[in-house]
Image (spheres, helix red, strand yellow):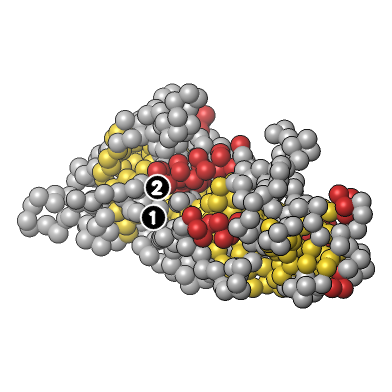
Amino acid sequence: MAEILTSTYRADLMRRFYDDTQENEYYMFIGNDVNEVGAKITSVNSHFSQQQFMNNILFGKKIQKDEIQFMVKYYPWQQGNVFDEYDDKTNLVDKRFYCVVGPNINNTGDYRVFKCLSNNSGAAVKTHPEWSNDNLDGVYPIPTDGYIWQYMYRLTAAEFEAYNASGFVPVIGDYNKDPYNIANTGYATVPTTIGSEVTNIKVENAEENFGYTSASGEIDSVDYSGVITADPYTNSPLNEITNYYTGFTFSIELGGSSSNTIIYEVASYTYDEATNTGQFDLEVDLNQLTQDGIAPNQRWKVTPKVKIEGDGTGAEALSVVTNGSVTDIQVINKGSGYNSVTASVVDPNFDFDPEDANTVDVRASIRPILSPKGGHNADPLLELEARRLLMYAYITETDSLSIGPTGTFSFVGLVKNPQWANTALYTANTGGPDVFDNRIAVITDDYQNTFQNDIITQVDADNEVIFSGKVHEVNTSANTIYISEYLGPYTNTANNSSSFDPNFNLLASSGSPITINTPVEDNITRSPLVQRSGLIYFMEDITPLDRTDKSREEFKLVLEF
């Protein structure tokens, strides 16, 4: 039997972790992947490997809370591509059902994300959706290729450049990051009253159904009691049978635009042979046509009625008939509050009998597609199958001066809530430093007795090694050596998280002494980090990168849930 971890479950895990990042401190720790004997360390999911990682930290950068981004896959709009359409019966994970329209082809100079509501039966795209401030419902039908797009959100060029990573882009915007978290009831508690909208109705047998009729033209006159005299186009004549169109839908385009259509039900119909016009008595209240702005010369159509039934309200749709077949359904009003819904094309009263074996009539089969709860774009994270978070950290020029512009690093990790030695400086209210240097800096006039990557030690009165570390940098202009990888198998000194003891001088591997300048405590700078503190959530050994005075590292860690 199938066992399904739903997208809601994964999105909920992601949201919970996001909330945790807002309530706690996360750091990107950077170090070397070489152990005490110079062998390369390969990361594995073990306690020993985590300890090795912590032993080799060179510096760290705090991940700012507003730099943590929800991420979705990057699907750029490209002419000729076929995008998957949203369907409430389809597993959309890893489907290309939305597109990103970039500044190279749009007129807004930024990135706009649109979700595909209809792909015109798998057609290739020809024209990209163009965002408009005048489009209030955010739905963009494209006449050239038949696609229908739902606008989702905007990315500025700066946001895209900063946060795009490994084929993913952030979900940006003023949206509720957890719209279903009802106070005191926990996550993913969705009120059943939210319901969905009917945003698309699919014709399941567009190539097989047959026997339907339609007509179109322009309004000749309007009797505001509810009767319209309709003048048909010559290529779309009206039937002469009385009440032939009773029960049909009579639709009128307001402002000459098919995207602004109003529909009525035909109560009765008569044909005037002398004028070649039809009189349609519509199911309307007195003066309703006046209120709706119906007037002569507006375009009209009469088509078989689409009947929508369900537990919501307000959904309306219009059938599109081509050469006797219902080929499409145009949703006029999406309605709201639907959890269960059905739709059908009402059988015409005349010239249609699909049960008669002597006819070629075939009834259209249509299926309404419900939006996610609350409608499209109510919860962009869940709708776009977001299940990844970006943890972003950037080493600025100022940061680079703080951590040293030399050396090589090849180990990166994500650490939660490291502790800090100077609790007076780094309190629970102020948090930890934005960036920290994990090396021990020693000012000594004997700096010439050692060199980069030299192993230096301290020995006690019994000539026992009590401290060992690697020279990471020698700054000759400041008479300073920087020591890294100093967490060996030695006893820590009192009130410290390493065994470095300022009461003992250092020895180079050659045996030459390295005397700390006096006063000793003024010539030693320790790391603010309580060594080996914090929870390791991620670590990776990477291709070694050399630092220079011009280095500006950008770390982008994408976590999948």
- 39 or 552, nearer to the observer: 39
Asked whether disc 2 touches disc 1, contact meaning CB atoms under 8 Å apart, the reply is yes
Tell me if 417 is positioned left or right of 4 in this view.
Answer: right
Picture disc at residue 431: none
Tell me if 160 is positioned left or right of 376 in this view.
Answer: right
Query: Which residue is the site of mark 1?
Result: 92
SS at badge 2: helix
Query: Which residue is the site of mark 2?
Result: 7
| Above or below, 21 relative to 552 | above
Identify which residue is drawn at 48% across, 67% down.
125
Q: Report crowding for label 2: few under 14, some 14 to 19, many 20 or more residues within 10 A (C-alpha).
A: many
Identify which residue is drawn at 48% across, 72% down.
80
Q: Picture coordinates of residue 439 (x, y %)?
A: 75, 58
Q: For the residue marked with disc 2, what is the amino acid?
A: Ser
How many discs appear?
2
Q: Picture coordinates of residue 335 (x, y %)?
A: 41, 35
Residue 316 visible to the viewer: yes
Q: Quadrant of residue 249?
A: top left
Q: For the residue marked with disc 1, what is the amino acid?
A: Leu
Q: CA distance from mark 2 to mark 1?
A: 9 Å
Q: Picture coordinates of residue 231 (x, y %)?
A: 41, 48
